[in-house]
Image (tube, grey):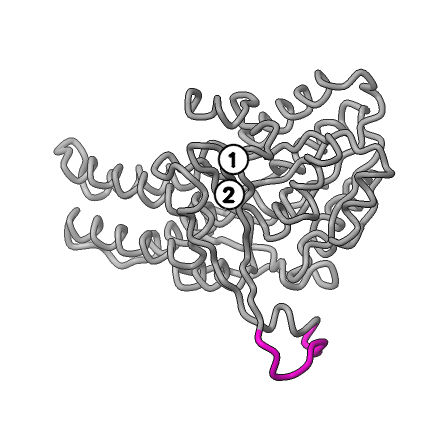
Amino acid sequence: MTLEAIKWNREENKLVILDQTLLPDMTLYLHIKDVQDGWKAINMMKVRGAPAIAIVGCLSLTSEIINHKEFKNKQAFFDFMKAKLNYLVTARPTAVNMKKAADEFIKLANELYNDSNYSLSSMKDRIVNDFEGMLEIDVKVNMAIGNNGAQEILSKNASKDSIIILTHCNTGSLATAGYGTALGVIRSLHKMEKLIHVYCTETRPYNQGARLTAYELVHDKIPATLICDDMVAAVLKTKKITAVVVGADRVTLNGDTANKIGTYQASIAILAKYHNVPFYVAAPRTSIDTNMYKGDDIIIEKRSAEEITHINGNRIAAEGIECWNPAFDVTPASLITGIITEIGTFSPEELKKHI
């Protein structure tokens, strides 16, 4: 059975999401009734992963549009939609997918508003249909990323039947509409019977790797080992890792990549370079920010101190200690072997030619 983090039922106008803060101990689906619910779910990381954030944000607006009392006119609908989309962007600012979706749908709504061939009713129908289409499109994109990444890794390795992958954070069905990005590459290699093993990091302080990636790997019966974040150097030195594959929340035009904290630090990207292990970023083109040239310009979300000082509600750090808890770091393009997208794998230098 395929894991579903997002479920949408048009007939019932019902959006439910898997509450990822409770995994792996409890499987609980939450009903997202409107944009306020969607914003809270994104901000509190009940749903996370750049593609999933955009999909849940837009579907929460879909539900509110359908439930909303009749709008007075096209202008009222456009203003309503624009305000709601811009509000959703504020839930988690680093991941670019929600921002890009908001900009694209505001642009579309403006075009429909100015098109006399569209009535208020047909304008709403077009927007709702396009929102709903994001689910199916994302799965297709992820499967293409998975296959492209698998082929890239196999093409660079003489030992094509002994692939061992290291990954960080969660980039699978729980972070997308299904299949996943970096975990999609792993799924494709497993499906091809080329994958021997996966090493996944715990991903402190929020433990997405331990709670979510391990959960998906066990669910899919993919041979895997969970390691602490500070064990990466030892694994790269001793376990014959074929490649590192991670996801991305935002990729700038020069190839700099923001991803979960720990991706860049001396536990993964730098060590992969030192050990001559290829380092790949798997991301849909919606994660590429064409308006931002370098990673230094990315706004990095800061999370609460409690994520560091507590585990499952229990304090583990000395009371009164100050904390710094950025949710992401930026890996320089110089450390990235290739960026795997749905249309192919490109070096950071080649990226802007293909988007």
Residue nearest the viewer, comparing 234 with 261: 234
Depicted 20 relative to depicted 59: above or below: below
* Residue 114 x, y percent position in the rendering: 14, 37
Residue 61's x, y, as percent?
37, 52
Callout 2 crowding tier (Cα within 10 Å): few <14, some 14–19, many ≥20: many
Q: Quadrant of residue 120?
A: top left
- Please state the extent of the stretch shown in magenta in the rendering: 312-322
Please identify the dominant SS of the magenta region: loop
Q: Is residue 318 magenta?
A: yes
Tell me the kind of residue under disc 2: Pro
Specify the label residue 138 is tagged with: 1
Secondary structure type for disc 2: helix
Residue neighbourhood size for the residue with mark 1, other residues' Cα within 10 Å, grouped as few (<14), some (14–19), many (≥20): many
Are dots 1 and 2 in contact, CB under 8 Å?
A: yes
The earlier-in-sequence mark between 1 and 2 is: 2
Tag 2 residue: 51
How many marks are shown on the rendered structure?
2
User: Between residues 130 and 54, which one lies in front from this camera angle?
Assistant: 54
The three-letter code of the residue at mark 1 reads Asp
Instruction: Decide which of 160, 275 is in the foreground and name it.
Output: 275
Q: Position of residue 192 (x, y in %)?
A: 77, 23
Picture residue at 69% right of the left edge, 44% below the top: 268
Which picture quadrant has residue 295? Answer: top left
Q: Residue at x 64, y 69 (%)?
A: 308
Q: Residue furthest bottom?
A: 319
Quarter of the image where the N terminus is located? top right
* In-image side of 98 versus 150 (left or right): left
SS at circle 1: helix
Image-quadrant location for residue 279: top right
